[in-house]
Image: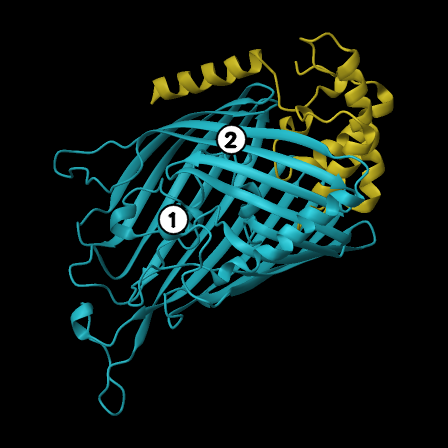
Chain colours: A yellow, B cyan
Amino acid sequence: MRWAWILWALGVAGCAAFRRGEGLDTGTLPVSVRADYEVFADRCARCHSLSRPLTARVDSPRHWREYVTRMRAMPGSGIAPEDEPALLRFLDWYSASRRDAPADAGAGGSS
Amino acid sequence: MRSRYPMLPVCLVGVLAPLAAESIDLNLAGSLQLDYLFTPFTSADPRPATHTLDGFTEELSLKLAIDISPHASANVKVCYGCHGFEVGMAYVDFRLSDAFNIRAGRFSPTFGEFGLRHDPGNHRLSDKPLPYDMGRMLRMGEFGRSVLPSPYVDNGIELSGSHFFGPRFQMSYAAYAVSGLRAQTDTPYDVDFVASHSASPFYIDNNSQPSVGGRLGFNARLADRVDLSFGGSAMWGAYDTRARMTYTVLGADLFLRVVRTNVRAEYLVRRTDMYAADQARFEYALTPSAVGVLPESVFQVRDGWYVEVEQPILRNLDLILRWDGMRRRGNTAPGSAVDFSSGVSRWTLGAQYVIERGYRVKASAESYSWWGLRSGVTQDWAFHLGAVATF
C-alpha cells in the first residue's frame, strides 16, 4: 500500500513538472482576449477537448463563423447566440497569432 | 431498396446547396486511440473466447466537415475499429434557423448526452459507460450487449433545433425517422447490433418500417461557470425482418458543471420483444393465453446507468470516477449463460494526462460485480492503459 502512495505522489509530481494542457495558458494571453478565451474554454470544453478547435485547420473569420454556428446548432450545446461575438473574437485573434508565430510555438503557449 | 428513398433528400440538398454557396470551407479532423485492456484471470476461471476485446485495440476516425454556406454543411466521417472500416457520418445539415435544422443521410440519431462525446477523443476514460458499451465490457458474450451501443449510426432524417430564453435558458429538441435497430431473422431473441455495423446491410433496411425517436433537452446557466442540463430521449421501432417484434428505448440524462468539475449521469432502458410461440425456444415457462395459445412474443428489459465525475487536479491531469451498471430481466434461450434476472455493477477510477495539446494518456482500473451469471463468477478486475491523439 505504501508503494501505491509513493507511485501516486511521483505521478502527480511528474505531471506537475510538465504542466502542458489542452488549452492555452491564460497568463500568456493578452489581457484584451482573456475574457473571450474564458468564454471559449467554458463553452467548448463541455463536449470535447480544447485541442479540437485549437488544432483545427480553420483560418478565415468567415470559416470560424460557420464553424461556431455549426457547433452552436448541436442539440444541447449550451452556446447562446450572445456567446458568438466573444468566441469569434478569440478565434480570430488565435488564428492571426498562429499565423504570425514561429512554426513550433503555439499561440498563447501551452506551457 | 425501399430504405434508399430517404437518401433522396440528401442527394437533392447535396446537389443544390453548392449552387448557392459563395465558396466552400473544409476542415479535416480526426482522432485515434490505442488502448490496452488487461484482464487478470485465474486458472479456475479460464477466459472464454467471447469474453471481451482484451489486449490492444485501436479506434481511428477521420472526419471531413464541409461548410457549404452559412446555412448548409456536410460531414463525412470514416471510422476504423473492431468492425473494420465504417462510415460513421455521411450527412447534410440544412439550417433554416436556430430552431429548425434538417439533417439527412447517415448519422447518429440524437439520444441522451453521451452520443455527442462518443469519440474516444472526446470522453476521458478508455471505454464507454456500460449502457453505451460496444464491446469492451467484460463477459459481453455471457451477459449480452448493452442497452444502446454508441455510436449507434443509422440512415434517415432528423429535425432539430434550439431556442434560448434569454442568455441563460436553452431548450433543444430533435426528432428523427431512421431505418432502426435490426435482427436478420423474423424469430429473434434480441436486437443484433452487429447487423447494423457489418458492411453488407449498411444501406438496406431489414424491414419497411422506419423507427422514430427524439430528445427534448433543457440547459440552464445557473451562475457564472455553473451549468445544469437535463433531457429525455425515446426511440421506438420494429427490428425483425417482418416488422412484428418491436423495441422501445427510453433515456434520461443530467449534466452539471460547477467551475471545472463535471458531473454526468444517464439512465437508459430498452424493452425488446422476443419471438415466442414455441416453449422449446425458452428456458422458463411461457404463460398461455386464456384459450391456451402461447403468445407470439414475450419481452426482455435491459436497463443501464452511469454517474461520472470529472475533476481536474492539475492543468494537465484529470481524475475520473464512474459508477455504472446494467441489468437484464426476462426469459432466456435454453442453456443461456444468464438467469432470468442478471446484472453488473462497475466502479472505475481513471486518470487522463495531457502530454501535449492533442496528445493524451488514459489509465483506469475497473471493478466488476456480477449477479445472475450461471458460470458463478461474481467479481472481475480490468485495467486500461491507452494513448489518444486528436488532430
Position of residue B204 measured from the top left corner of the image (x, y, whole percent): 44, 56
- Measuring 24% from the left and 77% from the top, which residue is drawn there? B277
Q: Quadrant of the C terminus of chain B?
A: top right
Query: Which residue lies at the image location 18% right of the left edge and 54% below the top edge?
Result: B374
Nearest the eye: B375 or B142: B142
Nearer-the-camera pick, B203 or B335: B203
Task: Check contact, mark 2 vs mark 1: CB within 8 A.
Answer: no
Q: Residues within 10 Å of mark 1 (few under 14, many from 20)?
A: few
Q: Quadrant of residue B20?
A: top right
First along the sequence among labels 2 and 1:
1
Q: Nearer the viewer, residue B50 or B89?
A: B89
In screen coordinates, is B287 left or right of B155?
left
Q: Which mark is residue B319?
A: 2
Determine whether the residue tagged by mark 1 lies in a helix, strand or loop: loop
Do tags 2 and 1 sit on the same chain? yes
- Does residue B217 appear in this view? no
Identify the residue under disc 1.
B200
As drawn, the label of residue B46 is none
Q: Answer with the quarter of the image where residue B347 lies.
A: top left
Label tally? 2
Q: Is residue B28 visible?
A: yes
Q: What kind of residue is marked 2?
A: Leu
Residue B260 pos. (x, y %) = 64, 34
Quote the CA–CA distance across marks 2 and 1: 41 Å
SS type, badge 2:
strand
Q: Residue at x 35, y 17 (%)?
A: A3
Q: Is residue B133 above or below residue B82?
A: below
Give how far across and how far down residue B216 sits, in percent.
64, 60
Foreground mark, 2 or 1? 1
Q: Residue at x 49, y 56 (%)?
A: B267
**Location of residue B136 with respect to A61 vertically, above or below:** below
Which residue type carries mark 1?
Ser
